[in-house]
Image: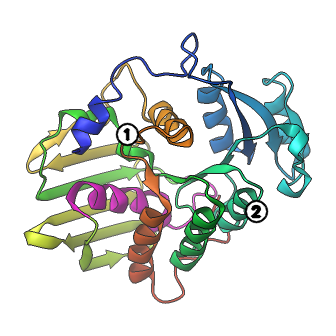
């Protein structure tokens, strides 16, 4: 099924939205990482009837408590090692700094939880591959937060794309990490998703604040990506075979909520739409490492 068709399949009322419970009891969700991303995800989850927030995990307990105050019955924990079966967790959101994403998710998968891991999923392709293997062996679903796949604007895009052009310019932000991992990896994954998985880098020009890429895929498929920091406001453009996709137009639906719907559907054995997998993270990180050299990007300050 094409991306527009997959998104259109989510266009009806979402099972799990408040007032529309999914089949079965609500799933227990653990949020690991009480920073900005954890708080954004929490806002979406609190609007759903098919989940209950059972724990907030963060080494900064006061930060975790502030989120837990919005979730009746949620416990506050300092680390995933404190998570016990009594908490009643089924799934976890992992929204830690980048270096901790894979080890945290691995520990949760080994405890039997399905995991939605914020992008890029790991700090290296090797770590993402190991995490994917862990999920397979544990028999648990692993999804990566490449949320651009769920942008409702893609429902209007032509199918069978041969060319993709992405432009993204905006301000830097503290703790954002390397540009290739902050914005670039979203656009690399989106290009792979639209054009096919076999993209390779044809030309690259990189600096701390600018990323220019040309990629080639099977059958002459082409992608052009520009990411840059320096504008006071975020500006994004996407063209698919010359058709401009309006990524920022007001929509009745939002990408993050649709990503959660797809992930929870998959946990329950249903369809997952364009949800990204651990294998997708491996591929995107492999492209990033090709840009940054054998040591990969420095993620130590990234969050």
Q: Does residue 95 sit above or below 25 in this rendering?
A: below
Q: CA distance from mark 1 to mark 2?
A: 28 Å
45 sits left or right of 150 in the view: right
Q: Which circle marks residue 114 in the picture?
A: none
Residue for badge 1: 150
On the image, the x and y values in percent for residue 152 come to 32, 32
Q: Residue at x 21, y 64 (%)?
A: 224
200 sits left or right of 49 in the view: left
On the image, the x and y values in percent for residue 148 come to 38, 45
Q: Does residue 9 sit above or below 110 in this rendering?
A: above
Which quarter shows the C terminus? bottom right
Residue for badge 2: 107
Label 1: how many residues lie within 10 Å, few (<14), some (14-19) or many (20+)?
Answer: many
Q: Does residue 75 sit above or below 81 in this rendering?
A: above
Which quarter shows the N terminus? top left
Q: Earlier in the sequence, mark 1 or mark 2?
A: 2
Nearest the camera: 208 or 135?
135
* Quadrant of res 44: top right
83 sits left or right of 172 in the view: right
Q: Residue at x 58, y 14 (%)?
A: 18
Nearest the camera: 205 or 53?
53
Residue 154 is at least partly visible in this image: no
Q: Does residue 74 sit above or below 201 in this rendering?
A: above
Farthest residue to the top: give it. 19
Question: Over which residues does the magenta segment extend?
Answer: 173-196
Judge whether residue 188 is colored magenta: yes
SS at circle 2: helix
Label 2: how many residues lie within 10 Å, few (<14), some (14-19) or many (20+)?
Answer: some
């Amino acid at each position: 099924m094409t991306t527009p068709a997959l998104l259109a399949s989510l266009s009806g009322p979402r099972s799990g939205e408040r007032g529309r419970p999914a089949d079965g009891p609500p799933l227990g969700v653990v949020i690991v990482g009480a920073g900005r991303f954890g708080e954004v995800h929490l806002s979406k989850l609190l609007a759903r009837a098919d989940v209950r927030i059972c724990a907030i995990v963060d080494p900064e307990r006061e930060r975790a408590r502030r989120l837990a105050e919005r979730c009746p019955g949620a416990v506050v924990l300092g680390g995933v090692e404190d998570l016990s079966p009594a908490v009643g967790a089924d799934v976890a959101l992992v929204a830690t700094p980048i270096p901790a994403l894979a080890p945290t998710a691995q520990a949760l998968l080994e405890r039997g939880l399905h995991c939605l891991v914020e992008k890029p999923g790991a700090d290296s392709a090797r770590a993402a591959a190991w995490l994917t293997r862990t999920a397979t062996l544990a028999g648990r679903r692993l999804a990566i937060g490449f949320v651009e796949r769920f942008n409702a604007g893609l429902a209007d895009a032509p199918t069978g794309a041969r060319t993709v052009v992405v432009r993204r310019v905006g301000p830097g932000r503290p703790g954002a990490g390397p540009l290739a991992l902050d914005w670039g990896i979203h656009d690399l994954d989106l290009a792979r998703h639209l054009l096919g998985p076999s993209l390779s880098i044809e030309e690259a020009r990189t600096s701390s604040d600018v990323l220019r890429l040309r990629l080639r895929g099977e059958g002459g498929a082409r992608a052009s990506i520009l990411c840059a920091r320096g504008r006071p406001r975020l500006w994004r453009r996407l063209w698919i075979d010359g058709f401009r996709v309006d990524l920022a137009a007001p929509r009745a639906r939002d990408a993050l909520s649709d990503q959660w719907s797809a992930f929870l559907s998959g946990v329950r054995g249903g369809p997952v739409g364009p949800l990204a997998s651990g294998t997708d993270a491996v591929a995107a990180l492999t492209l990033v490492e090709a840009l940054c050299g054998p040591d990969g990007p420095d993620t130590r300050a990234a969050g």
